[in-house]
């Protein structure tokens, strides 16, 4: 899923910069909700969802771990009034400094793990006492 830096209301002069108070630019990202739900396999619930994923920039893996995303229409009360957000997300726990996400980064589900076991058929096992 391709992500973009979520610039509104962070650093948006129209909101007085009060939206996500003190959140550095690049801590939050936005994305296409339909694509996200198709790739991750389920709708985003009203209160948001935490999940594990991989953060890519080009061919480089930048982070594997927790994320939090909220759906389109989530609202936030600020000192300038109620702000309606598009689908948005962040690292969980939140990144301490800005610049974590850049336009064009991708997040993807963690691959499923498979445990491989070796099974020796009794007829090929000299320890078999059958």
Image: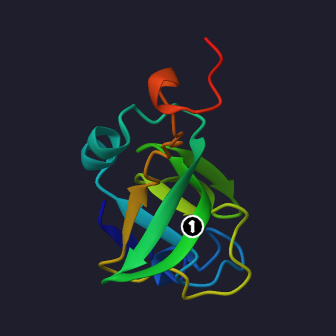
Quarter holding the N terminus?
A: bottom left
Q: Compared with residue 111, is residue 99 higher up or lower down, i.e. above or below?
A: below
Toward which corner of the image does residue 92 lie, by quadrant?
bottom right
Q: Could you tell me which residue is drawn at 52 percent across and 81 percent down?
A: 26
Toward which corner of the image does residue 5 lie, by quadrant?
bottom left
Residue 15 in sight from this viewpoint = yes
Judging depth in this view, the residue of 23 and 63 nearest the camera is 63
Q: Could you tell me which residue is drawn at 47 percent across and 57 percent down?
A: 88
Quarter holding the C terminus?
A: top right
Q: Position of residue 121 (x, y in %)?
A: 47, 26
Q: Position of residue 113 (x, y in %)?
A: 50, 46
* Label 1 environment density (alpha carbons within 10 Å; few <14, some 14–19, many ≥20): some
Count the marks: 1
Q: Is residue 37 left or right of residue 16?
A: left
Q: Position of residue 55 (x, y in %)?
A: 46, 70
Q: Could you tell me which residue is drawn at 56 percent across and 74 percent down?
A: 63
Name the residue tied to disc 1: 64
Judging depth in this view, the residue of 5 and 129 nearest the camera is 129
Toward which corner of the image does residue 107 lie, by quadrant?
bottom left
For numbered disc 1, what is the local secondary structure?
A: strand
Q: Compared with residue 62, is residue 38 higher up or lower down, i.e. above or below?
A: above
Q: Could you tell me which residue is drawn at 58 percent across and 79 percent down?
A: 16
Q: Position of residue 22 (x, y in %)?
A: 72, 80
Judging depth in this view, the residue of 58 and 128 nearest the camera is 128
């Amino acid at each position: 899923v391709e992500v973009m830096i979520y610039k509104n209301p962070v650093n948006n002069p129209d909101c007085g910069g009060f939206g996500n108070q003190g959140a550095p630019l690049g801590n939050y990202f936005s994305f296409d909700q339909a694509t996200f739900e198709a790739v991750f396999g389920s709708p985003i619930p009203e209160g948001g969802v935490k999940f594990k994923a991989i953060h890519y920039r080009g061919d480089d893996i930048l982070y594997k771990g927790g994320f939090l995303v909220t759906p389109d229409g989530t609202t936030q009360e600020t000192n300038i009034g109620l702000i309606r957000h598009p689908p948005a997300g962040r690292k969980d726990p939140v990144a301490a400094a800005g610049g974590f996400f850049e336009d064009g980064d991708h997040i993807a589900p963690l691959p499923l793990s498979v445990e491989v076991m070796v099974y020796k058929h009794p007829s090929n096992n000299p320890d078999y006492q059958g």
